[in-house]
Every structure is written in structure tokens, then in C-alpha cells.
Amino acid sequence: MRIAVLGTGGVGTTLASALVATGHEVRMGSRTAGNEKAVAWVATTGAGASEGTFADAASWGELVVNATGGLVSVEALTAAGAENLAGKVVLDVSNPLDFSEGFPPTVVQPDGRSLGELLQATFPDAHVVKTLNTMGAEVMVAPRALPGSHSVFVAGESPDAKAVAGDLLRGFGWQSEEILDVGGIAAARGLELYLPLWLSLMGSLGARDFNISIVRA
Amino acid sequence: MRIAVLGTGGVGTTLASALVATGHEVRMGSRTAGNEKAVAWVATTGAGASEGTFADAASWGELVVNATGGLVSVEALTAAGAENLAGKVVLDVSNPLDFSEGFPPTVVQPDGRSLGELLQATFPDAHVVKTLNTMGAEVMVAPRALPGSHSVFVAGESPDAKAVAGDLLRGFGWQSEEILDVGGIAAARGLELYLPLWLSLMGSLGARDFNISIVRA
């Protein structure tokens, strides 16, 4: 599949590399073509990797991953172009965290609405699926590096889009029973609000390579 | 130990019964002495159980559990009396959830501060420990009803108070390695903000008897 990964940070490059490694073609999108980190990623990755503007990537991709910073995601996806997102699955892995007042950061959800909901409302013809935002990038793409079973969540309005997200997740090694559908895009609220606990756990464990597992009676 | 449980709802009565069952004396506190639910709980529980006002319970107790609704906890603990909380461990198991706009509720954290922090700031001579708020009451007091290992968190400024909390948790069957210290009382932010995800999971699992386990590499 042709996949646009918007964002050149640690999450974007980790996802982009893993998607190429699992057989996809990936174009990394950034504010301007020729972005230094994107060019370096293409050079390192080789076949299957390309880069361009947000709009270059989104218009080319059959599926779009939003790995931009959560506080600038609406702006980035607007630059990508609503027409380039229409009818496509948009995997939103970002977190709207404001570190301006230090640690712990606040989760920015104006009027209680999640970023996932805001993206869906701003781009109504896209099929937004919130997923993977509840863990570090290294766990997203290599779940089997942790022992036993653990959990990844999907939230969104479109069952078909969530099924596509599930296929990509299985490509990274997630087991079907580890992929939990938590409901419509409003469930992105809980997925984003989990981040302060994730950050506390990162601090107390002194590590990023952990995740949560749902234990049922 | 003499333990005051403030609050007569499902969480308060479940905790109060489990505390009596594990050898403690418990006085249930409510807004007015002779509260119907508190009187019924005393009659059902028998030896070791008593009830009274918030102040009756808090002045009598050596340790205080805040199991009131999170949106009225400051008011309830003010009624209990700052002098009756001073020098004591206050286990805050409550969640400041606002359901007035329907489901999912919002977590009320004015200026980003958690209820745990607000209680500690309002009652600076108490030793507030946020714990047990991340699960249903039935799991709080019977962790071994779920299979395998899962997690309970403690957050607070006083290591001694967190140790006391740990003793009570072990009384319910929690294993020491399941009790995770996530830091000072500011970490209560993440513990409270987890609730929308817990509620989403409750909806998608169709059950309350679940919990999260931390899986580490």
C-alpha cells in the first residue's frame, strides 16, 4: 500500500521505517519538501521511501498517518489538503500535549473534545482512526519485544477503517486479540487522556519500553 | 486500625466491608448521622462497623478514606474537619467526573490540577495518597478474582503514608510487586485522567471486572 506518514519526528520515522520493512511504500510528508530529517530518512531507508510536502505525501498516499505534533496537527492536515484526505483512512497516532508549563504536561482538549474528534470534524470525508498513541514508538512497531500479551486500542466511526488499521497493526506483529476496539472517535478522549499516566509510569519505571495489558475476570 | 470511610456509595460500602473483613474497625461517615445507607451497612456488617457524620468518623479514625463523589470531596472533607485529618493518612479513591453533559464524562481538573492535589493543598497537614481510583470497587478489594498479575497505583508526597496504603492494599490481596508508586501527588493527574479510558473499556468489554497490568520489556 502507498502510505503517507506526516511528521518527521521520532514517531514518524519509526513508523515509516516499520511500514517500509513490512512491505509498504512510504512517503514522508513535512512542511517543506527537502526537510533535512525526511531526506536523511529516505537516504537511510532506500527502496520504498520518498519524501515531500504534506500535500505531496497525502495526495500520493492511499492511507495517511498523522504523526505530527498534536498541537499542530490540524494545521498540518490542512496543509496536506482536505481533498487529499477525502475517502482515505487517516491513522491519528498523535497526542495533543502541552509541555509549556513543564512536566507533567496537560492534554489539550478544548471543550472536552479530543484531537481525534477535532480531526474527524475538520476533515469529515476522511476516516479517522485513533490508535497507537498510548505507547512509545518502539513498542508500536515491535510489540513482540515485550513479553506476553498487551493491548493496542482503535477508536473511530468507520468499522472498515478500523479493519484497515487492524491489518497494519498485525503487520507490526500485533495479535488480533490484542487489538481492542474502544468505540467511536469520541473514545479518543480517553486514549489521549491516558498520556499523563503513561508519562508517570515512564518516570517511575525509568523506561519507555512498556505497555498496558487488559486483565479480565 | 480504626478507619473512617467517608461516603456511602458503592465504593464506600465495598471498601468499608472489606476493611472490616480484614480486621479493621470502620466508621462510615456521611453528611448527617443516621444516613439510611450507612445504617443499613452497619446493620448488615455487625461487629466492627459504626456510622456517624463526616466529622464523627474522621475524628474517631486513625486513617481516613475519601470515597465521596469527587465533585463534592472538598466540601465533604471540610465538613469532616481539617483538625480531624491533620497528621493522618487520607486515602483518596475518588474521581472528579462530571456526567452533566452525558457520556463520556469530563474529568474536572481546574487549571490542570488533580483532585488529589487539591485535597493535599486544602488540607496540608493530612498525608493524601491517591490510590485505587483506577478500577471498579469489586476489583479494589478482591484483586485475586482476576487472573494473573495486574496493577494498582499510589501517588502522594509522603513515603510513610504510601507505605501505610500499601499495607492496606496487601490486606485486600494485592501483591507488593503489583503496587506501583507513580510519584508525588501531582501524579494523581494521570490517575484521574485515566478514567475516561476505563469507562470506554467498560463499554467495549461489557464488564467492570477488569484492570490493567503493566507489561515491561
Image (cartoon, coloured by chain):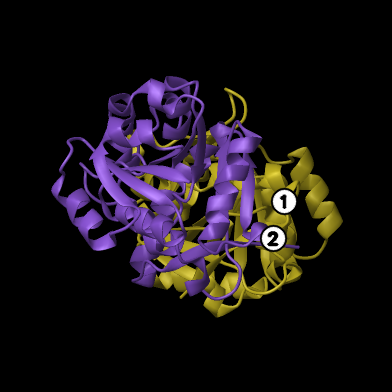
Chain colours: A yellow, B purple
Q: Are marks 1 and 2 in contact (CB under 8 Å)?
A: yes
Would residue B88 appear left or right of A24 to someone viewing this image?
A: left
Three-letter code for the amino acid on which mark 1 is drawn:
Arg
Three-letter code for the amino acid on which mark 2 is drawn:
Val
Residue A111 spot, x, y in % from top left: 32, 35
For disc 1, the marked residue is A208
User: Looking at the image, which residue sits at the far front?
Assistant: B47
From the image, which quarter does the C terminus of chain B lie in?
bottom right
Would residue B20 appear left or right of B151 to someone viewing this image?
A: left
Would residue A29 appear left or right of A91 to someone viewing this image?
A: right
Is disc 1 surrounded by few (<14), some (14 to 19) or many (20+) residues within 10 Å?
A: some
* Up/down of A134 relative to A195, above or below: below
Location of residue B112 (image quadrant): top left
Q: Secondary structure at mark 2?
A: helix
N-terminal-most mark, 1 or 2 = 2
* Residue at 52 percent of width and 71 percent of height: B144
Decide if residue A109 is in sight here: yes
Label for residue A54?
none
For disc 2, the marked residue is A139
Give the camera-side residue of B178 and A132. B178
Query: What is the tally of numbered marks visible in this picture?
Result: 2
* Up/down of A119 relative to B140, above or below: above
Decide if residue A66 is in sight here: no
Residue B26 spot, x, y in % from top left: 36, 48
* Residue at 76 percent of width and 68 percent of height: A145
Q: Tag 2, which chain?
A: A
Give the camera-side residue of A29 and B169. B169
Residue A181 spot, x, y in % from top left: 43, 68
